[in-house]
Structures are given as structure tokens and as C-alpha cells.
Image (cartoon, coloured by chain):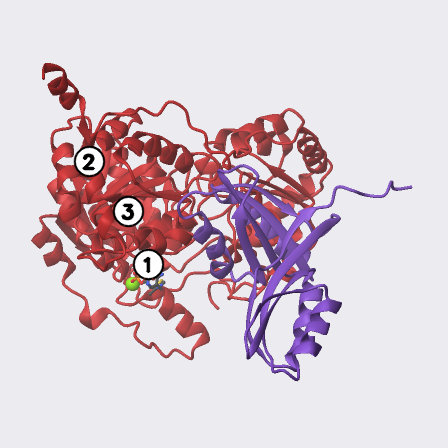
Amino acid sequence: MRHILSVIFENKFNAIPRIAGLFSGRAYNMNSMSFGLGEDPETTRATITSEGDDQIIEQIAKQLNKLVDVIKVVELTYEPFVERELALVKVQSSPSTRAEIMQVADIFRAKIIDVSHKTITIEVTGKEDKVNAIIEMLQQFGIREIARTGIVALKREFQKESS
Amino acid sequence: MAEKKKTDENLMTGSEILVKALVEVGVDKIFGYPGGKVIGLYDVLFRTPEIQHILVRHEQGATHAADGYARATGKPGVVVVTSGPGATNTVTGIATAFMDSIPMIVFTGQVASGMIGNDAFQEADIIGITRPITKHSYLVKDAAHLSQIVHEAFHISVTGRPGPVLIDLPSDILAQKTSYKPCVEMKIRGYNPTYKGHSQQISKAADMLNSAKRPLIYAGGGVNIGLAADELSEIAIRGHIPVTTTLLGLGAFPEDNPLSVGMVGMHGTWYANMAMMQCDVLMCVGARFDDRVTGRLNHFSPASRKIHIDIDPSCISKNVSVDIPIVGHVKEILPDMLKKIKPADSETWLNTIAQWKSEHPLTYKQTDDVIRPQYVVERVAALTDHQAIVVTDVGQNQMWAAQFYGFKRPRQILSSGGLGTMGYGLPAALGAAFGCPDDTVVCFTGDGGFQMNIQELTTAVQHRIPLKIVLLNNGYLGMVRQWQELFFGRRYASTVLAEGNPDFMKLAEGYGAAGIRVSRPDEVDDAIRKGLKIDDRPVVMEFLISREENVFPMVPAGASLDEMLEAGH
Ligand SMILES: Cc1ncc(C[n+]2csc(CCOP(=O)(O)OP(=O)(O)O)c2C)c(N)n1
Ligand SMILES: [Mg+2]
């Protein structure tokens, strides 16, 4: 099962390698890892997706917490959360396919951000499966390059009153 | 002009700042080895009478010596080495300390900041190399940070679950002149180990123990490191609870107490392993359900409900899931628990264990033509009144020392448990002797492991340290040979040392140590007595032992704890 861990840490020298190194050193599964400055400029937030049973994920969270630079680890899996991923997809295009590609982009509410005679670059944002879906749809035209950010996620605050 | 001169005089070099900070945190001994990038630092140490620098003969020796010093005294061990090869030579010692949660600070020289990354002469990315085996590490970027970093590093190393911390010192930082900025406060936002145990969990655990019929305490190195042996004993005695320990937990409960069931695990006692399998409540204190302890995991202690006390939350439910986890420091938790402990109704259980002890004691075959290693350990124990600090190497010698010495007090045995590092014994014994000069320090070692850091004999001779080195010479890499005998059709591939072994007596002599060789059982006592009397240099007591002696009981790898091979197998 896919799990999402949100990790806040002090952005000190060596902190990112220590976090990444845990996954290789302890043979933990890691699907994506994204980093960006947190709400406090001295911290960074990592969003990590991993596969595994609950026990492994608990171990990962504990091991992350043990790192001196790590301030907080939140496992989002069992909480309501919002997630997004951004991808740039560079697709081969010709005058005959251009319209069709743009249509696909439209359906996914993706943006065209660059066009050349032979390519179109599309920016898409959404949940991981939406990004996967558009990539699959674009496959038929020939994908030149893909750059994905990996997932970022936050706990969802708005919740229906539980009855 | 005059004012400018004054401020110049107030400036200190990075090396001076570092040493001042070391004095501040109470360092009085450093184990190390100089080199190009740390000559300036050594120059400052040279004129710092508060700190004794002990020149080892290999950087691995420095780390093991610092480790032995830390295990014996409870204070962090300190190491200084140069960049590149000096730094990489510390890796095994750091990993050894990391696996056994030993506080240690390692200072490594580094090429100048501007050169890092250029493959400069004697450059090594030691921070990268040691990342998975350190609790934390620092690359110093400004000499003004040094005092802060040193204070933080020591704090991190000794608190929570202790461990090694590495500080990498670029040469330009050591030379940099700046004013001393003292460490005013430590604020490490992500580091806040839990000390106090959850009181409800503690009550629940006490209730569980009080109502148990077959309770068992399984104590590990955490009790020794956490200085909580007395607190543990009180619980065991008041609660009528038998105690088994891990290798690193030996000494945390006196083995001559009737409640002691000795060591558990692969080479634990028969009765400890059976008790593990049959207890109905198991309380693990400062141990981590290591595979050498549990045997086959899915058949480990099947009848018990489990309590686990540990300062490191990641140790809890890692290998074995437990019913009552308690995160915190043993020294805080055990006294809280003691208040709630009542005598359990464990008489039948204690009788069963007593019977097991008489039916399946630790034994060996005594002979009068050839020396049995177990006999040597027993005699050393008797003639040192079970009071020596015992340091072991790794292999059969380690297990015989663990099984037959009879430990009475915490921090009495120093052994590489987690990593199983051959070559640990001699340098660790050296470090222990520097830390506890009034104690007798005995090092049990093998003919293989002794040669892995034998150069430290020089260091011991130079400082006239009367180490008692008990070399159990079987002419084999004995522990590996035992596995080959039992599981690989007696094919002794690359485990025969006999033909190639040096003359250990000449070797001892060459180093300036005393040497005593013993080949007959009736000479053993005299030799030990003679060796114990030598007080001005180390002595190598070489015992030519029964060559194919095995360590029993043995839980074969992957077997369950109650599937032991016993002596006479
Ligand atoms: C550095 C290192 N290399 C290899 C091993 C594997 N090993 C474990 S015990 C052992 C044999 C040790 O032989 P010796 O020192 O003579 O001790 P004995 O078992 O004979 O008492 C070996 C090779 C190890 N533990 N450490
Ligand atoms: Mg041997």
C-alpha cells in the first residue's frame, strides 16, 4: 500500500543525504521524494511516498524521527489529505497531431507551455493517478521527455462534521 | 594601534578554540594519530596539560580504545585523526560503537574548505562514508562555530540512545583566527529524547508482571549504559522475577544471584533460552530483540505477553511486536515501576528454572592432558575474584568469556556485540585501562583477532599498562571452524591458522611485553598468578587449548531458541 510521509527538518548541511540515505541503507522502498522550503525559512519539508505494510512505514517514520535534524514526521495515509504532483511532458507533434494533443491536454486541464515545430510541452497538475493518466494518453504521440516533481501533500483541514 | 594589537591577541586559532571547548566539556583523554591536516591541532594539544593524548599505532585502535574507555567509564571516548586514510581507518571502530550505542566523538582532519571536492591529496568524504554509522556529524564551516558544535556533539553523543558523532575539520578552519564564541545555549529543534516513561504504561506493565506465573526479565546493554543495574535488581528481587541478559547486558544482574538465568541467545545457557520460550510475561529492558537473541523470529517466545522498555522508539516493535511499549530512560522508568511491583506467584516457575539449571548447566569436558578454554576462563575469574574488567575479542574466545567468567557488576564486560568486530579486544582493553587505572583489565582474545590490532601492544608497553591478555590459541579461526565442522562437512576452508601463526612469545618480547606460554592444565593457575602480578607492562598469557573445542549450547542460525545443540553433540 502507498503511504505518504511529510517530514519537516532543519535545512542543515547533510540533512537531505541523511534522509535519503536511510532509504538505501535500510532497504526501504521509496517511490518519490520531494523537497522544498517549509513555512519557517529555517526548515524544509520533504514529502515522501513509500510502499509497505504499516509496520515498515512505522519503522521508517521512527527512523526519520531519530535523525537529529528532523523536527516532525507526519504520516498522512490515515488522515484526510490533499495531494498534488506537477509534471512537464514534452510530446512529439506534427501539424496533423497537434490539435489532438491539445484536446487531450484540455480534457485534463493541462496547459501548453511550450511549442516548437516538432514538440509540445504540457504542464499538468493533479493527483498522481491523473498525472499517470495523461501520460498514458500522450504515449501514442511519442513522449520525448518527462519531468515530474513527485508528490507534495498536506493534511486536509476542511472535513464534514462526523455524525 | 594599541587597541588593534589587543584585539589581535584575543583572537584564537580554530585549533585553540577546539581544544578550549574540549577542556570545557571535560575531556581529559584523547586517543589519536597525527597527520598533515591536524599538525596545528596537535601543536595546541602539546601545550594543553589538561588533556592527555594517547598515541595509538593505528586509527582503528584509536576508535576501539575510545570505545573501551567509554564502556568502562560511561564518559564519551574522544578520537582525533588526520584526513583521508586517517579518517577512513576509523570506520570499523565507529561502526562498532554505533551498533552498540557507545558515546564517542571522532574529530577528523579534512582538506581546506576550498579544496573539498577536488580530489585533493588525502581527501576523503568521511562525512559521507560514515553517514549511516554515526548518530550525527558536522562539517565545520567557521571556527567561530566550534565551541557550539563541540558542546552539541557531546550532548547528542551521550544523551538519548548514545552513539558516535563525527566532526570534520577542514585545515583552513583549524588555522582560522577569530574570537572565541562560547556556546551559550543548545537549541537542536529536532532532538529531544524522551526520558520519563508514560505512567499508565508503567502501571500496566507492573500489573502484568505482578499477575504473571512465569515472568522473565530480559536485560540488555541499555541497563549497563543507563546505569540502572541496581534499579533492575530491585524489581527482580521484589517481584520474584528471574533475569536473563544479552551479551551486552552481562553484569547488569549479578550472575551469582539465584534469580539469574545467565545469558540468552545463540550461545546462551540452555535454561535462559528455555525460559525465553516458556515465560508468560517477558519484560525486555534496554535490549532490541536482535537476531542473535531471538533465534527464529516467528517462533520466538510464543507464550508470552511482552513489555519493552527502550529509550529509542525505533527499537520498539521493529522485530517483535510488543503489548506494552514504554519509551524512556531505564533509570527513570525502573524506579517508577518498582513502586508498583509486588511479588509474583512465580514459585513453581522458579523451581522449574532451578531444576533446568541443575540438569543442563553450562559444562565442558575437563581433561588433564590438554587445556580447555572454559577452564582458563574459570580460573582467571576465580583468581581475579570475578572483579576484573573483562574485554573480549570476537569468536569462540568471546563466547567462552561471556559464559564462564561469572559477571557481578555493570560495565564489567566490554565486547563488540552488534558488529562482532575481530580486533576489538586489545585496543578496547587499552582504552578501559586508561579509563579505570585502578582496575585489573583482562582481555580474552583469539589467535586470529589478536593479530588484527596487535600493534596496540606497543601503546600499552609505552604507557606501562599492565593489561592481562589471555590468548586462547586454538590455531584456528575457531568460531568459523565450528560452523564448518557442524554445517559444512568439516571442510576447514581458510580457517587453519596454526601453520602460519607467529611465535606469540617472541612477538610479546619484541614489543616489550611479558610472555607466558602454557600448554598443560596443571600449569594454568601458576601462570595466571604470575601474569596477574606483573604491574609494569602488559603480559600475553598464551594458552594452547584443545584445538577443536566448540561453544555450546548453540542455537543454529535460523533455528528456534529451544532447538539447541548441546555439549556432547
Ligand atoms: C573483522 C572480522 N572479520 C571476520 C570476522 C568473522 N569471524 C568471526 S569469529 C572468527 C574467528 C575468530 O578466530 P580467533 O580470533 O582465532 O578466535 P576463536 O574463534 O578461535 O576463539 C571470524 C573470522 C569477524 N567477526 N570480524
Ligand atoms: Mg583461534
Q: SS for tag 2?
A: loop
Give the letter of the chain under mark 3: B
Is residue B226 found left or right of A105 in the rendered image? left
Whether label 3 lies within 8 Å of ligand 1 gets the answer: no
Camera-side residue of B150 and B423: B150
B193 or B114, which lies in front? B114
Ligand 2 occupies quarter: bottom left
Of the numbered discs 3 and 2, the one sitting upstream in the chain is: 3
In the displayed structure, B391 sits above or below A53; it is: above
Q: Of the residues tagged 3 and 2, which is closer to the observer? A: 2
Quick one: which chain is red? B
Up the image or down, B422 lies above or below B230; here it is below
**Residue that label 1 marks:** B372
- Indicate the chain coloured purple by its letter: A
Q: Does residue B9 appear anywhere in the picture?
A: yes
Instruction: Identify the chain of the residue marked 1, using the numbered disc in the image.
Output: B
Say what secondary structure mark 1 lies in.
loop
Q: Residue at x 75, y 68 (%)?
A: A107
Mark 3: few/some/many CA within 10 Å (<14, 14-19, 20+): many
Q: CA distance from mark 1 to mark 2?
A: 59 Å
Mark with earlier residue (1, 2): 2
Q: Which residue is mark 3?
A: B63
Residue A13 locus on image (x, y percent): 39, 45
Amino acid at pointer 2: Gln
**What residue would you read off at disc 2?**
B176
Residue at the location (37% across, 47% down)?
B97
> Could you tell me which residue is drawn at 17 percent across and 46 percent down?
B37
The residue type indicated by label 1 comes to Arg
> Tag 3: residue type?
Thr
Disc number lying in front (1 or 3):
3
Q: Position of residue B248 (x, y in %)?
A: 44, 46
Q: In the rendered image, which quarter is residue B433 located in?
A: top left
